[in-house]
Image (cartoon, rainbow, N blue to C red):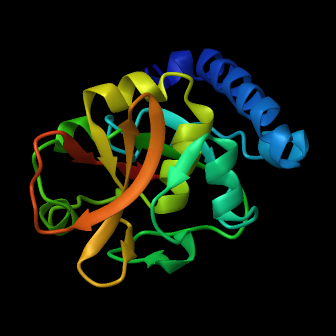
Amino acid sequence: MFNRGPEARVEGIGVLSAELERQADIYRGLGVQKDAIMRLLTPRPDRLPKELSIPVVTLGVSVDLDHQARFAGITPYFDLSRAHDTAGGITYAQPRLIWMHDGKKNKNKSIEWVRDHLKGNTSPSTLADGIALAITQPNIKSILRNHAIDLPGSAVGSGSAPGLFDWDGGLGLSHHLVDSAVPVWGSALSGS
């Protein structure tokens, strides 16, 4: 939708601008100024793999992650302060526009396998990226009914990574082992 060639670039930036305005309206509930979001408006980099097609403004740690999770209606089942970046994942200090996919293509692949098979210009999505996806995507519950989302750019302790899932109609964050391939879980990836 956002990467259709040079002649569609102007139209594409208009669509992206409208999407960032929508996300800015949501983030206003967390005290983030619209200008802080709208200044991120730049075309999707052509070098990104085509599957990174979901524009997401991640707040990183500019707003407390636990506060962001609760704002999104996510119940954390572990202390979010225990998570840290790993395997090339980057949690930003300030808001940033990233491009994601929701992990569907990585269903039934272990987090470890996904980390080992990253291609250029692709990073493993972090805990902050997953929370941002939940905040900004109106269809997140539909996605999570299809599959849970591993966040391979973060680790919780040693040997486990966080994941976002649907639990009885609500959203939850847990963590599980990185060497297990689970058919209903898929690792999300990002790029910017």
Answer yes or no: is residue 3 visible.
no
Q: Where is residue 137 in the image (x, y as percent from the top left)?
A: 55, 29
Which quadrant holds the N terminus? top left
- Determine the residue positioned at 54% across, 16% down: 8
Q: Where is residue 165 in the image (x, y as percent from the top left)?
A: 37, 42
Q: In which quarter of the image is residue 128?
A: bottom right
Residue at image x 38%, y 76%?
Answer: 156
Seen in the picture, residue 189 relative to 20 is either above or below; the reply is below
Residue 7, given in percent of the width and then of the height, sits at 53, 16
Counting every numbered tag in the picture gives 0
Q: Would residue 188 be found to the left or right of residue 133 on screen?
A: left
Compared across the picture, whether 10 is left or right of 100 comes to right
Residue in the picture at 69% in, 19% down: 14
**Which quarter of the figure has residue 111?**
bottom left
Q: Residue furthest front?
A: 168
* Res 173 → quadrant: bottom left
Instruction: Mark yes or no: residue 186 visible.
Output: yes
Q: Position of residue 131 (x, y in %)?
A: 55, 50
Which residue is nearer to you in this view: 79 or 185?
Answer: 79
Tell me: residue 122, above or below residue 81.
above
Left/right placement of residue 124 relative to residue 169 reads left
Q: Relative to residue 72, is residue 23 depicted above or below?
A: above
The single residue placed furthest to the bottom in the displayed view is 158
171 shown above or below 68: above
